[in-house]
Image (tube, rainbow, N blue to C red):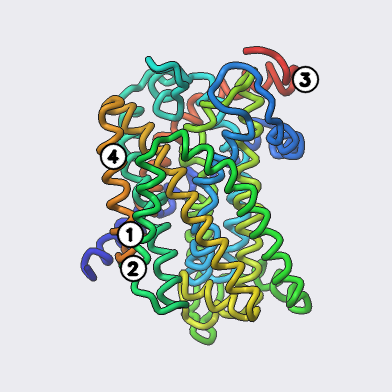
Amino acid sequence: MKTIEEIFKLISDFIWGPPLLILLLGTHVFLTIRLRFIQRYIFKAIKLSFSRKKEGTGDISHFGALTTALAATIGTGNIVGVATAIAAGGPGAVLWMWLTGVFGIATKYGEAVLSIKYRTTNREGFMCGGPMYVLERGLKQRWLGVLFAGLTAVTAFGIGNTVQANSISTMVRDTLNIDTWVTGIILTALTAVVILGGIKSIAVSCEKLVPFMAVFYILGAIILLCMKADTLPATFSLIFNSAFTGHAAIGGFLGASIKEAIRYGVARGLFSNESGLGSAPIVAAAAQTKNPVRQALVSSTGTFWDTVVVCALTGLVLVNSGEWQSGLNGAGLTTAAFSHFKGIGPFILGVALFTFVFSTILGWSYYGEKAIEYLFGIRAVRPYRYLWVVMVMVGSVATMPTVWSFADIANGLMAIPNLISLIFLSGVLISETKKYLWSDNLDGES
């Protein structure tokens, strides 16, 4: 197992080297500029996202599509992922993660526009969309669509399954002294009940769960920050300075360069908000919408809530606690930080992590299924579901470095074909945005 961990770490470091970081951040900035800083419409997008009325062609409402995407997006990356970024890259990683989210709003918007524009209907009458259809029908490169779908089906086991299960089982072991295999059995059984029951039950469950878990965690984190408000100015200063100067070894912290702060901040930012990954547009393509731009605006708010708000709050709590200097990592660091707030801290962490983990496991199973359906047809979906359930158990008992490194590798590879489509079809994005948003025709039919 140690050898596997080392191999995965080497591959992950290679994939997440300068070329991919430049491609990812470059795409975020490129689209931000070409779309005239689309982020300025974020409050209009938030208002649209709460509309539950039926409009246009599609399977689910604006709000249903957003909450389903957020169910998959808001997960352990928002809590444990932030901790691993800080432990490896120092406090400065928080700022780079936040910036990835701000600029990533433009990329999330672009992904959704293309996925809705090039979506299609299957033989059962349901919408099918996502980067695989964009690559096939927009770029006329089916082989890239197949590549993306294959990577999605595999990536789902990392970002949406094993990492999630590993985080909750590790936390339960560290706080309640319960073996990881016990938590694994319970989580596997719960997953099986929902997943094997069908995708409609997943969507309904996520739509009810996401608003509760997001509001609960945001309010909880704000309370924790207010309890140590006197150290917040120093915490902000530390995060900013560390982002541009790196951070020397201190206490149990081994030190980190600017390169490490950027590398881990950007990698965890992508892991958390999935902007550029191409996953969220798969469910955005199922939304009832009059035109691609309306739902794309709604979809872009997912990155705002996930990284600009939730990840930022987590980073502030972790750095403000001072535990980042202890030498702890992942779930251990998170648990130690929240334990500073007797009673309320562990409760907020426990409820948030369980709901985040479970909703993500359910939401990402949908992405994986749609990828498998694209590749092999509807008959391959049920075997995939069984394998999905089994991997929840595997993730629960695996060691954390192996799981996180695998997730980073899969994420990086999955992002590449999606980013290619965004760059080469950016002209289509401009045309659609001009037609509906810049011409004040947001209610226009496509």
Residue drawn at (69%, 19%) of the image? 436
How far is disc 2 from disc 3 in space, using C-alphas? 56 Å
Task: Determine whether, in the image, residue 41 is placed left or right of residue 260.
Answer: right
Using a 10 Å C-alpha cutoff, classify the residue at mark 2 as few (fewer than 14 neighbours), some (14 to 19) or many (20 or more): some
Q: Which residue is mark 3?
A: 440
Q: Earlier in the sequence, mark 1 or mark 4?
A: 4
How far is disc 3 from disc 4 in space, using C-alphas? 44 Å
Q: Earlier in the sequence, mark 2 or mark 3?
A: 2
How far is disc 4 from disc 2 in space, using C-alphas? 24 Å
Above or below for 93 versus 295? below
Q: In the image, which disc is placed on residue 380? A: none
Residue 7 location in percent, x, y? 25, 62
Q: Which residue is mark 1?
A: 395
Residue type highlighted by circle 3:
Asp
Task: Determine whether, in the image, residue 374 is placed left or right of residue 74.
Answer: left
Q: Nearer the viewer, residue 213 or 433?
A: 213
User: What secondary structure is marked by label 3?
Assistant: loop
How far is disc 1 from disc 3 in space, using C-alphas? 48 Å
Above or below for 73 versus 312? above
Residue type highlighted by circle 2:
Val
Residue type highlighted by circle 1:
Gly
Q: Which residue is mark 4?
A: 384
Using a 10 Å C-alpha cutoff, classify the residue at mark 3 as few (fewer than 14 neighbours), some (14 to 19) or many (20 or more): few
